[in-house]
Image (cartoon, helix red, strand yellow):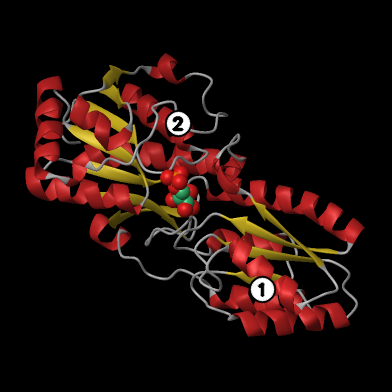
Amino acid sequence: MSKNINKIAVLTSGGDAPGMNAAIRAVVRCCAFHKLECSGVFRGLQGLIDGDFKELGPRSVKNIINRGGTFLKSARSDEFRTKAGRQKAYDNLKKTGIDAIVVIGGDGTFRGAKVFNDEFDFPIVGIPGTIDNDINGTDITIGYDTALNTVIEAIDKIRDTANSHNRLFLVEVMGRDAGNIALNAGIGAGAEEILIPEQDMGKDRLIASLKRSEKSGKTSSIVVVSEGDQIGKNIIELADYIRENMDKYEVKVTVLGHIQRGGSPSCADRVLASRMGVTAVDALLNGERDIMIGKSHNKIVSVPFSEAIKLENKIDLDLIRVADITSI
Ligand code: F6P
């Protein structure tokens, strides 16, 4: 066990995700288990720069495992991108006697953490928390399962009304750069078409496919569109294009937006967050640093930050085939 670590800070950064509170709780309680001090940092990496710290004990994190969002709050910090900002953060950590940090966030957070570790040789371990599930080296990120369930619940409701009126609904889901939510929730909700940033279907193929569905007897349709999809300028323009080319359906648009980021975490997210939080503290005590805790083949694993921040396309092509076949 590392003798040099007596106090660990924990923070959440980037877009919040359901289950972040459960991860903080696990970190705080694992620190207590090992008789270490734990400090919560408010507003992510920006809080390091501003010295916004609060001592946390096991009772500070009571009744939060079930709560969405993050009680430590989150932020995207431009100042942390500057050397001067990172120097301020380092000075604050030293002043407060913090020996290591657990950062919970997405690839932007890990990029910042890696630079910080390279510059100051400061032990940091990451936990992947983002609804997008777009981090390399882990099968799943905290918040993804809950977000998928939120999306299918919403689409199920849209389907009821779509079907009652012979309407075609375009439903926009989150995922600026990644189509994981669209593809998986699309299959789960039985969407007719799924548009993702990783694969540009093209407007003509979309219309042809919708016409085939119409001919096969479908009276309503759900098209799930990922926020980052490139097929049209935006979902409103795409809806206009479909209206111009298909007269049978009335076309409606629903943008699910930030409701996908909120809500009580699913059991899967709570368990994942708890496992990752405990492993992150254990990893620091075992002398590990500059790594993210991931999940691979149902085992909790360590992944170097350099691997985790590689933006590799994680879309499973087999899922696209499944979506095509099951929507016939
Ligand atoms: O990265 C998570 C995410 O929810 C993306 O899916 C989405 O594109 C983005 O954050 C939205 O960010 P913001 O809340 O800053 O608008």
Residue at 63% across, 69% down = 238
Which residue is more in the foreground, 301 or 197? Answer: 197
Q: Where is residue 42 drawn, in percent x and y?
A: 32, 26
Residue at 31% across, 40% down = 103
Which residue is more in the foreground, 307 or 16? Answer: 16
Above or below, comparing residue 200 to residue 308 in the picture: below
Q: For the residue labelled by badge 1, is the local secondary structure a helix, a strand or a loop?
A: helix
Residue at 74% across, 79% down = 245
Above or below, comparing residue 150 to residue 221 in the picture: above
Q: Where is residue 132 drawn, in percent x and y?
A: 48, 54
Q: For the residues carrying marks 2 and 1, which lies nearer the camera in this image?
A: 1
Q: For the residue labelled by badge 2, is the local secondary structure a helix, a strand or a loop?
A: loop
Q: Where is residue 304 drawn, in percent x and y?
A: 25, 57
Taking the image as drawn, is residue 36 in sight?
A: no
Give residue 70's mark: 2
Q: What residue sits right under mark 1 in the picture?
A: 241
Q: Which amino acid is tagged 1?
A: Tyr
Marks 2 and 1, the one that precedes in the sequence: 2
Taking the image as drawn, is residue 112 in sight?
A: yes
Q: Is residue 278 left or right of residue 164?
A: left
Q: CA distance from mark 2 to mark 1?
A: 40 Å
Q: Is residue 5 left or right of residue 312?
A: left
Q: Is residue 109 left or right of residue 194?
A: left
Q: Which amino acid is tagged 2?
A: Thr
